[in-house]
Image (cartoon, helix red, strand yellow):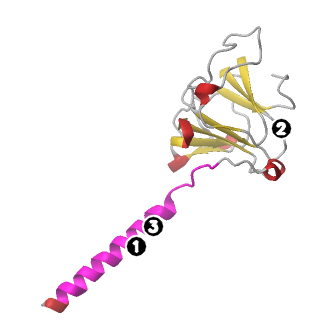
Amino acid sequence: MRAVRSLLATLVAVLAALALTATAAQAAPRPAPHADPHRVAAGSGYLYVSQDAYWAGRWCWWYNADNNWDTINVAENANCDNNNRASMRNLASSAWNDSNTGRPVALYIHPDYTGAWACLGAGDAWDDLTGAWFTWGSNRDGYMKNTNDNIASHRWRSSCSVG
């Protein structure tokens, strides 16, 4: 009887370890912005954002421009952790331009690339968007408004001054 209990305890421990390993393997890796200047030219090519500051909470990534963050579309080469493609519009609190072309990304206050925009340089990351502002497009709605929980669309640009 003692041997059976010991065997059962060992079996339960092994199964628990296997379940934990399988769960960890299925979890998507969290983005980790870095300061390596050589990475700018060899980045992933994605824009990463997270719902909470300092890369906490739900996060999404895009390879192409997206004129409306209400939907996260696979056709735009976009996705979110755990395939949760619910709206990210006006929810982002961290952003990272992991460009592989050296181009900045314009983050717009409204859908369809309208209103004022913030410019996130290639390889740059803003861990807490409460410290970032829509500083481009001085004659547009939203100019000098805080970017935290206010981004609705984005696209890569040749320079920050070209909205």
Q: Which residue is mark 3?
A: 22
Instruction: State the SS at label 2.
Output: loop
Q: CA distance from mark 1 to mark 2?
A: 43 Å
Q: CA distance from mark 2 to mark 3?
A: 38 Å
Disc 1 crowd rating (10 Å Cα; few below 14, some 14-19, many 20+) is few
Contact, mark 3 vs mark 1 (Cβ under 8 Å): yes
Question: To which quarter of the image does residue 154 belong?
Answer: top right
Which amino acid, mark 1?
Answer: Leu
Residue positioned most to the left: 1
Observer-nearest of 87 and 75: 87
Question: To which quarter of the image does residue 132 belong?
Answer: top right
Q: Which residues are magenta?
A: 4-32
Residue 2 spot, x, y in % from top left: 14, 90
Contact, mark 2 vs mark 3 (Cβ under 8 Å): no
Residue 20 spot, x, y in % from top left: 40, 66
Q: Is residue 97 above or below residue 91?
A: below
Residue 110 spot, x, y in % from top left: 65, 19
Q: Which residue is mark 2?
A: 103
Disc with the residue nearer the chain's start (1 vs 2): 1
Q: Nearer the viewer, mark 2 or mark 3?
A: 2
Instruction: State the SS at label 1.
Output: helix
Question: To which quarter of the image does residue 92 belong?
Answer: top right
